[in-house]
Image: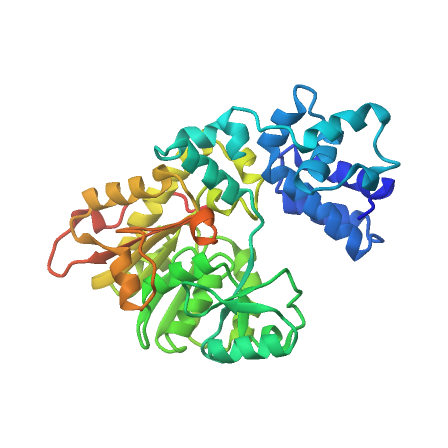
Amino acid sequence: MKINLQQFNQIEQVLFAMVKFDRPADAVLTAHFRANSKLGATDRHLIAETAFACLRHLETLRALCGQRANTRKLALATLVRIGGANLRELDGIIKETEREWLSSLKGAPLPEELTARAALPQWVLDLLPPLAEEEVVALGKGLASAAPLDIRVNTLKLKRDDALVQLQDSGVACEATPYSPIGIRLKGKPSLAKHPLFVGGAIEVQDEGSQLLGLLTGARRGEMVVDFCAGAGGKTLLLGAQMASTGRLYAFDVSEKRLANFKPRMARSGLSNVNTTLIAHENDTKVKRLAGKADRVLVDAPCSGLGTLRRNPDLKYRQSADSVAELNAKQQSILASAARLVKAGGRLVYATCSLLPQENQAIVEAFLAAHPAFELVPANQVLAEQKIALDTGDYLALRPHQHNTDGFFAAVLQRKAGVADAALEPEAEAGLQ
């Protein structure tokens, strides 16, 4: 596709703002499109796809561009090396002095540095678990790929097979997800906002990996269930459907805005058993009054988000080893507080969208060492009980290059009956913010 100078200038402007990494990349893009409201759909698509492709492959592109990797060079390198544009499509944009460089760039070998081959900054490589270099490169390539569009079928309203038929009949190419029994993967990125199934609450956009986290909770009819860090409410909706809108489902969050954004989704879903609750922190009195009463508690903890780099590639530059260390303290405090809600025999699921052991296994192992009333239930066993053919061992560990989902971690913990645990007594306040 021929790219004109105006389109290229827009790409440059967006990239220049994005690589400051002072705010989320999607916020930069939204602000740019708002300020340039006359841009057409084709222009917007080209600008967004090119800018995000650059962020996904930034380490590689910087290494290929050398010392003088300014925004212009990065934009051109993304179009040619990642987007596959030929030089004729860039006529009127590139200078003669750039033509030879871009021609050689197409087939240039990758630099030897692991950061360039894996498209991951050094601080991320330093914190990853010990892996062979080829595995790190495979993981990096997976994280640098574009994510598919997955949806979850609201089983309160429709069966997955019926949803597949209705979507296909309406011209949406799709197929069942390989692991989640309630998921559908769309081909391409069709707009769903006005689709009757979306408007009527029969489907919701949700990555297959996120669906599996909710399914690990195993919520049932008539139970008391808590989504401890509900956020935008995607997993809350899944839990409510599992419960057939019976029992009591609490959606806790520290963000009033996130809970407000959740309400229209809840209205579409048809759920009537959800209590959305704004809390100040994880030791809020609203939390403490449910101590020892919950059958299931899901903790989708605040984390680095490095498992979502396919969608949020800027996070690898907006996070750091120091910010992960700060998150670790919050994760420990949140998990300990959520554990107090679980009754004897109840289930606690700790989950993150991170790939780092510091946010995952280390948090769970420290929790189990401090809380003898809890034991680990193998995740593969829980999935097998639900006839889900996925075995990543004791923990759920999803990777984009292996499972074509975002990178997720989850541990299933069960509270033993009749075991005292002094650590489950109320603790001092900490911050869930």
Viewer-proximal residue among 58 and 337 = 58
Viewer-proximal residue among 274 and 416 = 416
Viewer-proximal residue among 336 and 36 = 36
Total tally of numbered discs in the picture: 0
Asked which colour scheme the image uses, the reply is rainbow
Residue 333 horizontal side relative to residue 116, left or right: left
**What residue lies at 48% left-to-right and 31% top-to-bottom?**
320
Confirm whether residue 192 shows in the render.
Answer: yes
On screen, residue 244 above or below 38: below
Residue 406 horizontal side relative to residue 242, left or right: right
Task: Please provide percent x and percent y for residue 28.
Answer: 69, 43
The picture quadrant where one finds residue 229 is: bottom left
**What residue lies at 56% left-to-right and 33% top-to-bottom?**
317
Task: Please provide percent x and percent y for residue 171.
Answer: 66, 74
On screen, residue 294 above or below 306: below
**What residue lies at 48% left-to-right and 42% top-to-bottom?**
306
Residue 291 horizontal side relative to residue 58, left or right: left
**What residue lies at 33% left-to-right and 44% top-to-bottom?**
333
Confirm whether residue 120 shows in the render.
Answer: no
Task: Please provide percent x and percent y for residue 60.
Answer: 59, 31
